[in-house]
Amino acid sequence: MTSVDTFGTITPSLQSRGLDWHRRFREDRGRALRVLHLGNIANNAFNNARIQRQYGIDAYVIAYETYHIMASPEWEEATFEGDLGDPFYPDWTKVDLGGYQRPRWFASGPLELCCSMISAEVDGQADLANGFRRSLDRARQSVSGETATARAIRLGQKIKRRIRRSPAMARDIFMRRVLARDVDPEQKRLVAVWRQGNAPASPPSAADFASYRARLAPLVNLMDRFDVVQAYATDGAWPLLAQRPYFGYEHGTLRAIPFQDDSLGRLTATVFLGADHIFVTNIDCVPAARRLGVPPDRITPLPHAFDDTKLAKFQAASDGIRPPDDCVVFFHPARHDWLDADPSLVKGNDRLIKAFATVSRENDQSRLVMIEWGRDLDRSRELIRSLNLEARVQWLSPMRKPQLWQTYLSSHAVLDQFVLPSFGGVTFEALALGRRVITNVDFQSAEEFFSEAPPILSASTENEIAEALRKVIADRNDGRGIGDAGRCWIQRNHSAKRIVELQLEAYRKRIGVGP
């Protein structure tokens, strides 16, 4: 088990204090700890709440106005085939979900309806909650798909969001340029929070928080019904405005955004500086949190929300799936983004393609499998053609998790990304399935973050990637046991139990209830 030291790093601990504390909490209160997760980018809140519930926590998710296919429970749990249309507004009625129903603790759609549904669920008013759930279903359906009506509704919502900011922007101009001061006590409070840190930008303005302030009302009373409010990315703006305690959760959010002198940068910096505690899920973002000025005792390095037991069961049921014997298969499922200057987005796909071109000339039995997605997909295809690699590259359509995991198991190695010295879901899932992984990782930071660095073939440059590919080819059956070592590392350092334990330990320290 692990705990968090005063420098914001994971260190070994003698016992599972968080789980023990929650057991005492339930005995004292006569109910489980109640946690509200706000926001759901990439299903992080959904996956987090799901594993928390496995350990008896009464967790709920409000994924307000978030419709992306990868922020939907169906993506994680349902079995389906077919075209959903626009991935940002998928039409789930177009596919057969096999009777799948979203969990009652998950609300997605207009914010006010989400709050009403979760409130009814917490109160045990099942019929009322079902009514709100049906309203949410209708609201989601109205904006989903590619019909003219759906597009018109989405455009109207976009315009409405811009209008929300207009009064605050006008006020900012008047107060800053005409009066040259800000007399609003609430805005002074936000500026005071921002001044606690080291953000290089200018102080936050009323316009920076305008969109959140305009929709705060339905959340105020709801937040009071929870022991913990855990806000993802910038959604901590709501509890900050309501002057309620909250835990911030970053998923790449702290890497560069808080240091930008724009509205999003100022908002992000203030939200994370105002949090009672923050969970940092990316190795390279712990130093960023410190640089921002978050006190070390308010930082918990936290592995990405991830259920290792789910993958263990999948592998046990897929025992017959193995890599082929007649060639070496490298699977690269990352999206194709390699021209953008933003380091949070680029994957370095071009470096891999060039490295594979070199290695494939040395070994004609190697194959590269990639997925058709990403902004620079066409450029990747052009690069492959220019290097005469078309016969050795296989393209797959975007796939759901079961198909993705099957492809991991049928590959000799999984290749993630090569720019940032960090890693996410691709790497964790591949390790859990016993696959060798090639990606860019800073072993010192990884050891600090997890207390033990993962057994990964680290590579960033074209030459380093090529050398890692050669190592896999030379040991195609993994005689060194790197895959098995990765699976054991996940069990020790990245299990669902550990993720829940780390959060409970942070809750225990901040809530201040019980020993």
Image (cartoon, grey):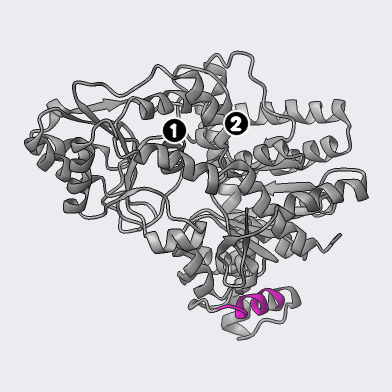
Q: Which residue sits at x=74%, y=55%? A: 17
- At which x and y percent is residue 24? 86, 50
- At which x and y percent is residue 317? 50, 19
Q: Is residue 499 above or below residue 86?
A: below
Marks 2/1: CA distance? Answer: 22 Å
- 226 and 392: which is toward the camera: 392
Q: Is residue 417 above or below residue 264?
A: above
Residue identifier under label 1: 433
Q: Which residue sits at x=48%, y=56%? A: 282
| Secondary element at tag 1 | loop
**Residue 146 seen from this side:** no
As for residue 195 lying within the magenta part, the answer is yes
| Secondary element at tag 2 | helix
Q: Within 10 angstroms of label 1, few (less than 14), some, or many (20 or more) residues?
A: many
Q: Which residues are magenta?
A: 189-197
Quadrant in the rendering for residue 77:
top right
Q: Is residue 46 above or below residue 274?
A: above
Residue identifier under label 2: 73
- 36 and 238: which is toward the camera: 36
Amino acid type, residue under disc 1 in the picture: Leu
Q: Which residue sits at x=62%, y=30%? A: 140
In the image, is 290 to the left or to the right of 190? Answer: left
Amino acid type, residue under disc 2 in the picture: Pro
